[in-house]
Amino acid sequence: MAVSPRDSAAVLAQAAVTVGPLIRSRVSGLPPEIRHVAGLHFGWWNDDGAALETAPAHKSVRPALTLLACQAVGGRAEAAAPAAVAVELVHNASLLHDDIIDHAPQRRGRPALWAAKGLPAAILAGDALFFTAVQTLADLPEASRTVPVLLACVQALIEGEYLDTLLEATADATEHQVLAVAAGKTGELLACACELGAAAHNAGPERAGHLRAFGHHLGIAFQRMDDVLGIWGDQAVTGKPALSDLRARKMTLPVATAMTGDTPSARELRALYRAQEPLTGEECLRAAELIEKTSAREATLERARQYTADALKHLDLAQPEPQAGAELTALAELLTARDR
Ligand code: FPP
Ligand code: MG
């Protein structure tokens, strides 16, 4: 019997229902103090340990990709649940460390863990989540195939993140360099999410490879949207302060594009980015104004569209089962036209 595809909101909600309890169960196995700060990061309880009545609903994008990739190759979503948990734990580990690196005071509309509880809490909670992710895969019979995929992904994340910090210190970056950062720090995790989903149903190398490539291209498109939201996004929906990427002098594609060339605007933007300190509120507004004067925003959105189109070509080549294929397509389109 043909089943009609679910809309993306239902797909994400179902992914959260599938992995949420498993993530909580994994975190509950951590020693008490680290468990406490990890739960603060997830928004499950407050600092007194009282459960939050409306624990925030996470978007579960990566788990949804893992579950759907498994279904795309003919498997059941549940078979990929541990892989989805591992990917989401790595994602959260990386965010804990990223917020420290970026000096970002907020995450998901709440104080970042390092800002609330200090650097040791955030560093160690990130480490704990990362090793819990590895343990989640290591506990399964197919561990010898899946753990290396996750570990290679984390090495790529680390390289991407480090390259990102190197670019921030340069005040001039090429589009190629900015794309390499996105490929490492975002593309690889989405690629890994899809690859592990396919592996949970023992997909052949060709199908798994195309699903991996789908995730990789989607991740780059997703990062380009993040670039746009980091400058022009609405704080109420992004959960991050307006202009936060500019304040932190992040080298995103709109910034790199607007800095290119020898125009007065490009020179002024480069000078602002050469400063050692985070930009002041006034400097952020000026930087946004300088970027607005160029076609950098449209150029970034166009790049996002191209990477989304390439992602969808790979999805097609993976010959997905119809329902999962339609749901992955809708999710890709949502993520690359998102306002949050
Ligand atoms: C967010 O980027 C950061 C990432 C997508 C990856 C961060 C990776 C690491 C810290 C290395 C991996 C570490 C572990 C422990 C697994 P962003 O700053 O552009 O996005 P944001 O605006 O959401 O912060
Ligand atoms: Mg960041």
Image (cartoon, rainbow, N blue to C red):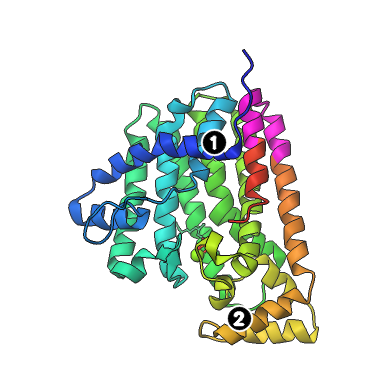
Residue at 63% from the left image edge and 28% from the top image edge = 5
Mark 1 sits near ligand 1, with its Cβ under 8 Å away? no
Closer to the camera in the image, 243 or 275: 243
Residue 40 left/right relative to 219: left
Task: Judge whether 173 appears above or below 96 on screen.
Answer: below
The amino acid type of the residue labelled 2 equals: Cys
- Write the residue at 59% across / 60% down: 181
The reply to whether the magenta stretch includes residue 317 is yes
Residue on which disc 1 sits: 10
For marks 2 and 1, the one nearer the N-term is 1
Dot 2 crowding, Cα within 10 Å, few <14, some 14–19, many 20+: many
- Residue 284 is tagged as 2
Give the residues in magenta: 312-328
Q: Is residue 217 above or below residue 172?
A: above
Q: Quadrant of the N terminus?
A: top right
68 or 145, which lies in front? 68
Residue at 52% across, 42% down: 192
Left or right: residue 91 versus residue 126 is: right
Residue 90 x/y as whole percent: 42, 49
Cβ at disc 2 under 8 Å from ligand 1: no
Judge whether residue 55 is colored magenta: no
Callout 1, which amino acid? Answer: Ala
Instruction: Identify the residue at the far front of this view.
Output: 53
User: Which is the main secondary structure of the residues drawn in magenta?
Assistant: helix
Give me the disc on residue 230: none
Decide if residue 305 is on the left or right side of residue 217.
right
